[in-house]
Image: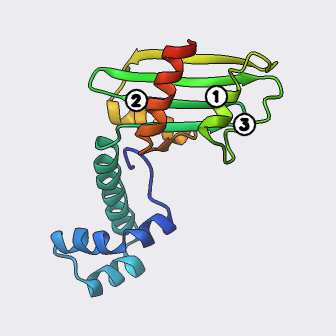
Amino acid sequence: MPKYRLLTEDELKELEGIFINFLAAKSITADEWEKIKKKDKDKMRELLEEFSDVVFEKTLSNVRLLEKRTPSKILFFIPDDEGIELLGLEVQGDAGIDFTKEFTTDDILALFDENNDTEVNFVMGKKPYFEDRKKEIFDLMQSGAMISQNDEFLNFFRQLKETYG
């Protein structure tokens, strides 16, 4: 049983070259892999589980920022060595903005306009890890958070918090 989950068929296709190297490191040739797939489903599953865990372990160890969006919320999860920091915005009322669609920083700034009837709340927190760091990041991803490289956007949110929070 994999520690995280089996990679999907599409994910495996994207990682085909890496998977071939994984099999080669185990001295499994292309012909042997074809035989395993046809005749030894347990061994095939075992290898796919092991490869999936290797991929997830490597990916999760490198995650520095996660982002989760709903129509009315945008949340950033910032994992470090001790725990996960949360910073985000929640909008209540008709803001004319949907965080799951395209928007600009100006659209967000407009939420703080005095003439705007929308209620905007900062969502913040920090929690220590209760389990393994990678497992908690994986769980966030399973709940809809995506790995992000959007440091500029996170910094914009930090500035918003300093200005309006």
Q: CA distance from mark 3 to mark 1?
A: 17 Å
Whichever of callouts 3 and 1 sits on the residue coming sooner in the sequence is 3
Q: Is residue 124 visible?
A: no
The spot of residue 112 in percent (x, y) is: 68, 20
Which label lies toward us, 3 or 1?
A: 1
In the rendered image, the vertical position of residue 1 relative to residue 47, given as above or below: above
Judge by depth and name the residue closer to the eye, 49 or 153: 153
Label placed on residue 109: 1
The circle on residue 71 is 3
Q: Nearer the viewer, residue 118 or 59?
A: 118
Q: Which element type, helix, strand or loop, lies under badge 2? A: strand
Location of residue 78 by image quarter: top left
In the displayed orientation, state which residue is furthest to the bottom.
31
Picture coordinates of residue 124, whole percent (x, y): 51, 16
Callout 1: 10 Å neighbours few (<14), some, many (20+)? few
Mark 1 secondary-structure assignment: helix
